[in-house]
Image (cartoon, rainbow, N blue to C red):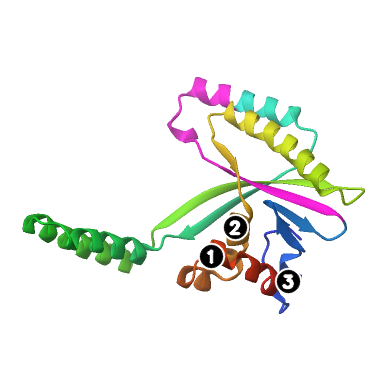
């Protein structure tokens, strides 16, 4: 079963997620297996000319041939929390001295509120999951090997025009949290001070 594939069977969150914990942004799995998650930007392939598309395909092919490890690509689509955005915008505009700006801001808020009441505003993010299986439990060595793999992938995707960064521990936990508990994640987003509690109770 894929690491981020949600099971339809009634099981505990821990058994569905199939990870033992997160340390320094590294997922710790059973049987001495480890993963790191990279977030990547996207490129608009359709807007490129035929020559640019051909060049990009050739570069991507060279990138795949240069890899000596498998990897998983995850596309995550999430609904944007527009209520939070509008509340923050309203708070800023209420303190504005000019009445005309406050009026225009109110009109904007009403327009966006009406828009999102009939349409969901979605965001799409792309992740690359890199695996590593260790013969021992030397975590610094494991972390270094994963870092080397991540550097190779980041450079390869960089040649395609993509920006890549490694997720930290909180971001990795938030990815799983939002996937398995999307409603709760929207109402109570993770904070740095909750990471230890989440490790102990959720994972």
User: Of the residues under marks 2 and 3, which one precedes in the sequence?
Assistant: 3
Q: Which residue is mark 3?
A: 14
Q: Which residue is mark 2?
A: 170
Residue at the (81%, 49%) spot, across then down: 139
Viewer can see residue 22 = yes
Image coordinates of residue 10 in percent, x first then y, are 71, 79
Q: Are marks 1 and 2 in contact (CB under 8 Å)?
A: yes
Q: Residues within 10 Å of mark 3 (few under 14, many from 20)?
A: few
Residue 185 vertical position relative to residue 140 in the rendered view, above or below: below
- Per the rendering, the mark at residue 190 is 1
- Rendering quarter of residue 179: bottom right
Q: CA distance from mark 1 to mark 3?
A: 18 Å
- Per the rendering, the mark at residue 101 is none
Residue closest to the far right: 135
Image quadrant holding the N terminus, namely bottom right
- Near-viewer residue (103 or 193): 193
């Amino acid at each position: 079963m894929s690491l981020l594939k949600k099971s339809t069977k009634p099981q505990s969150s821990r058994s569905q997620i199939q990870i033992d914990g997160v340390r320094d942004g590294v997922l710790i799995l059973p049987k001495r297996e480890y993963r790191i998650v990279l977030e990547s930007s996207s490129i608009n392939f359709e807007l490129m000319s035929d020559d640019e598309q051909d060049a990009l395909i050739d570069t991507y092919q060279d990138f795949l041939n240069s890899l000596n490890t498998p990897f998983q690509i995850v596309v995550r689509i999430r609904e944007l929390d527009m209520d939070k955005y509008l509340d923050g915008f309203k708070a800023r505009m209420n303190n504005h001295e000019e009445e005309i700006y406050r009026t225009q801001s109110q009109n904007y808020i009403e327009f966006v509120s009406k828009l999102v009441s009939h349409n969901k505003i979605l965001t799409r993010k792309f992740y690359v999951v890199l695996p590593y299986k260790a013969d021992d439990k030397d975590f610094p060595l494991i972390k270094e090997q994963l870092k080397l793999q991540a550097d190779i992938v980041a450079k390869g995707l960089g040649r395609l025009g993509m920006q890549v960064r490694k997720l930290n521990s909180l971001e990795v936990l938030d990815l799983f949290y939002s996937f398995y508990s999307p409603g709760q994640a929207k109402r109570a987003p993770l904070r740095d001070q909750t990471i230890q509690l989440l490790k102990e109770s959720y994972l």
